[in-house]
Image (cartoon, rainbow, N blue to C red):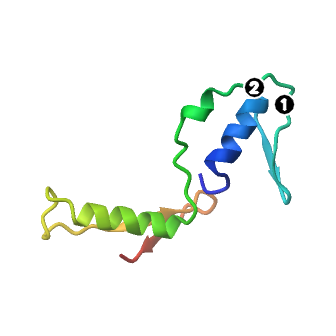
């Protein structure tokens, strides 16, 4: 969700429903179409910065009225390639 924006996803799907590809120049539609504009109504919940996204989630969780201060809350980023977890300080 970090390698594209909602606009990129909507444009790709408007062109074709086939799997797109990415290279050093960005995303490319490799399909023959047709596409669909139905994705214009979807919030793709893309992420610009993983650590900042986790910090925002940590803050929201820690400040939630149903989460007592006595409950420790931690956030991590999972690296799909290496399988490693990296803790994100709040």
Give me the residue at 22% from left, 65% from top: 63
Give me the residue at 55% from left, 33% from top: 41
Q: Is residue 13 above or below residue 45?
A: above
Give SS at disc 2. Answer: loop
- In which quarter of the view is residue 47 placed? bottom right
43 or 85: nearer the viewer: 43
Whether residue 85 is visible to the viewer of this picture, yes or no, is no
Q: Residue at label 1?
A: 31
Q: Which mark is residue 21?
A: none
Q: Residue at label 2?
A: 35
Q: Is residue 53 above or below residue 30?
A: below
Give me the residue at 70% from left, 46% from top: 8
Q: Is residue 82 above or below residue 11?
A: below
Task: Locate residue 70 relative to residue 90 in the image: left or right.
Answer: left
Residue at the far bottom in the pictured view: 89
Q: What is the crowding at mark 1: few (fewer than 14 residues within 10 Å), some, or many (at least 20)?
A: some
Badge count: 2
- Label 2 to label 1, Cα distance in Å? 9 Å
Residue 52, percent from left and from top: 47, 69
- In which quarter of the view is residue 58 placed? bottom left
Q: Is residue 3 above or below residue 30?
A: below
86 or 19: nearer the viewer: 19
Give SS at disc 1. Answer: loop
- In which quarter of the view is residue 64 placed? bottom left
Task: Locate residue 87 relative to residue 42 in the image: left or right.
Answer: left
Answer whether labels 2 and 1 touch (C-beta < 8 Å): yes
Residue 69, percent from left and from top: 14, 70
Task: Locate residue 71 relative to residue 90 in the image: left or right.
Answer: left
Residue 55, percent from left and from top: 40, 69
Give me the residue at 12% from left, 64% from top: 68
Q: Quadrant of the C terminus?
A: bottom left
Residue 20, percent from left and from top: 78, 39
């Amino acid at each position: 969700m970090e390698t594209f924006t909602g606009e990129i996803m909507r444009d790709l799907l408007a062109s074709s429903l086939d799997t797109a590809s990415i290279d050093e120049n960005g995303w490319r539609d490799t399909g023959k179409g047709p596409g669909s504009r139905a994705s214009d109504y979807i919030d793709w919940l893309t992420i610009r910065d993983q650590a900042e996204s986790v910090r925002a989630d940590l803050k929201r969780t820690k400040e939630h009225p149903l989460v007592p201060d006595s409950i420790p809350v931690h956030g991590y980023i999972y690296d799909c390639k290496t399988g490693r977890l990296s803790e994100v300080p709040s």
